[in-house]
Amino acid sequence: PMNTTTSLQDDVKQLSQDPQLMLTAGRQALDSIMRILDGTHQPEAIGHDRLTRMAALIETSLPHRDALLVAAINPDTTRDDLTTITEQPHDPAAVKLIFTSLTTCFEGRTPVNQERADRAYNLFDQLTAAVGPTPHLSASRAYLAWAARDPDQASSYMVQALTLDRTNNLAALIALALSKNINPTDD
C-alpha cells in the first residue's frame, strides 16, 4: 500500500499503462542519474515533476530500481549498461551486469565509492522529499547503507520499507543479511 502524494500515484498509473512513456521517461531518468552519480549534475536541480516521475519509475519498474543501485555501487557502469538493464532486463548481459556488480560489492572486491554512494543517497533524499517514503526508495536506501557498511542506517531504512510493504523482496534480503550479520566482506 502506497501512502504518498497523488502525483506519484498518477505517474505510476500513467507509466504502467503507456509503454512509450515508460521508455521515454526511463531514458530521461537514466541520463539524469548518470550525471548525478558522476557529479556533473545536482539532484536539487531536477524539478519536482521529474523527481516524481523518477520515483514513479523506481516504484513501477524493478529494472529501473536495479539500474540505479548498480550505477551507485559500480562506477564502471555505462549509460548503455543501464539501458540494457531497464529495456532488456532478461538479456544475459543485463543479468550478468547486475549479478557481477552486486557480487563484487558483496565480496568486497570493489568497495563502495563513498563519494558516488553519497551522491546516490542525496538523490534518494531528493526523491523521498518529493514523494515521501516509498517501499522501493526505502529498500534501495537500505541496500546502499548495507553496501557502505552502515548496518544501523540499513536497518532503519529496511524497517521503513517493510512497514510500507511487507512483501518487498529487497528489504527482506537486507533484513536477512542483517539478522545473520552478513556484510560485504572486509579486505
Image (cartoon, grey):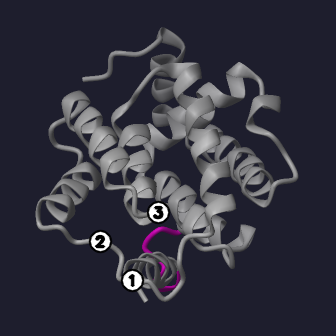
Task: Estimate the x, y position of residue 23 in percent, counting from the top left.
Answer: 64, 48
Magenta segment main secondary structure: loop
**105 magenta-colored:** no
Closer to the N terminus: mark 3 or mark 2? 3
Relative vertical location of residue 180 with respect to residue 167 in this rendering, above or below:
below
Q: From the image, which quarter does the N terminus lie in?
A: top left
Mark 1: secondary structure:
loop
Does residue 87 show up?
no
Q: Do the residues labelled 2 and 1 touch (CB within 8 Å)?
A: yes
Q: Position of residue 99 (x, y in %)?
A: 41, 80
Q: Mark 2 points at which residue?
A: 183
* Residue type (three-letter) at the residue carrying disc 3: Ala
Q: Name the residue under label 1.
A: 186
Which stretch is magenta? 88-93
Seen from the viewer's position, the closer of residues 149 and 125 is 149
Give the residue at the far right of this rendering: 40
Name which residue lies at 51% across and 59% down.
Answer: 69
Residue at (52, 28) in percent of width and height: 128
Q: Residue at x 45, y 78 (%)?
A: 105
Left or right: where does residue 51 sit relative to residue 99? right
Amino acid type at circle 1 is: Asp
Left/right placement of residue 85 relative to residue 133 reads right
Report the amino acid beneath label 2.
Answer: Asn
State which quadrant residue 39 falls in.
bottom right
Image quadrant in which the C terminus is located: bottom left
